[in-house]
Amino acid sequence: MEKVIEISHLTKNYGKNRGVEDVSLTVEKGDIFGFLGPNGAGKSTTIRSMLGFLRFSEGSISILGLDSVRDHEEILKNVGYMPSEAWFYMSMKVEDAIRYAAKVRGVDCREEAEMLCERLKLDVKKRIRELSLGNRKKVSIVCAMQHKPKLFVFDEPTSGLDPLMQKIFFELIEEYVSKGTTCLLSTHVLSEVNRYCRHAAIMREGKLTLLDSPKIDDESFLKFYMD
């Protein structure tokens, strides 16, 4: 199988503060890979290193066959990244924020964006400051998906979404994955991984443990943090 993400011995130090230590991870094309762990475990540090937003101390990262440092800009063209915080200019209308995200990539995404907004019940005429957290999350989802990237990287994407929108969000992921997209899902919600992911790993205190199966019960999950 084609390897979309290859992380080898990634280490990121923050002086006295913990980063990540000796993380190695492979995600193959067409996978929905669950990246579990509590806040502060090192998930976001790993993701930001993958996408070239952080300089790491040791190791190497390949995304879509490209070097994460040298080919940073080319990688971002083919990645749909949704950070844990949905930040936009508060005075912008939703439609303008979505159009701006497409313009930055130089891609005409109008048809795909319209479909996504309809599925997510997103009012594009409202201004960002008028939106709830859940609706700002929807804007982030549209911006990440509208250019039909080869890789999704979602960092805590469902916080703020109601159960129906969570279901629709995962339906969309599965539809894109069926057409060849790959997804890395960073979350602390065990049920999401059990239900939707094909492979998974757990981050704890900056270190990674690969799971034999993404299906893990609550008792086993807690054991990873207690041992």
Image: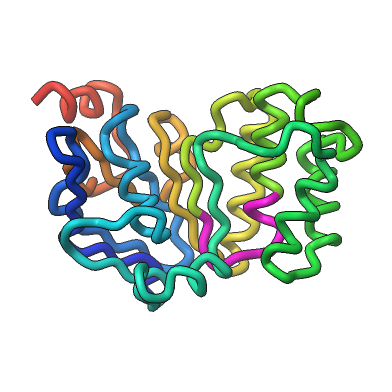
* 197 relative to 116 in the view: left or right: left
**Quadrant location of residue 94?**
top right
Tell me the quadrant of the picture where the N terminus can be found: bottom left
Q: Residue at x 33, y 38 (%)?
A: 36
134 to 138, vertically: above or below: above
198 to 76, vertically: above or below: above
Q: Is residue 208 visible?
A: no
Q: Residue at x 50, y 70 (%)?
A: 73
The number of discs equals: 0
Q: Is residue 148 magenta?
A: yes
Please identify the residue farthest to the left as the structure is shown. Answer: 227
Please identify the residue farthest to the right as the structure is shown. Answer: 125
**Quadrant location of residue 79?**
bottom right
Residue 40 drawn at (x, y percent):
29, 30
Specify the color scheme: rainbow
Q: Which residues are magenta?
A: 143-152
79 to 62, vertically: above or below: above
Q: Is residue 209 visible?
A: yes
Q: Residue at x 65, y 56 (%)?
A: 175
Residue 3 drawn at (x, y percent):
36, 72
Q: Is residue 173 magenta?
A: no
Residue 59 drawn at (x, y percent):
18, 64
* 58 relative to 54 in the view: left or right: left
Q: Residue at x 62, y 67 (%)?
A: 179
Residue 42 drawn at (x, y percent):
28, 39
178 or 25, nearer to the observer: 25
Tell me the quadrant of the picture where the C terminus can be found: top left
**Quadrant location of residue 51?**
bottom left
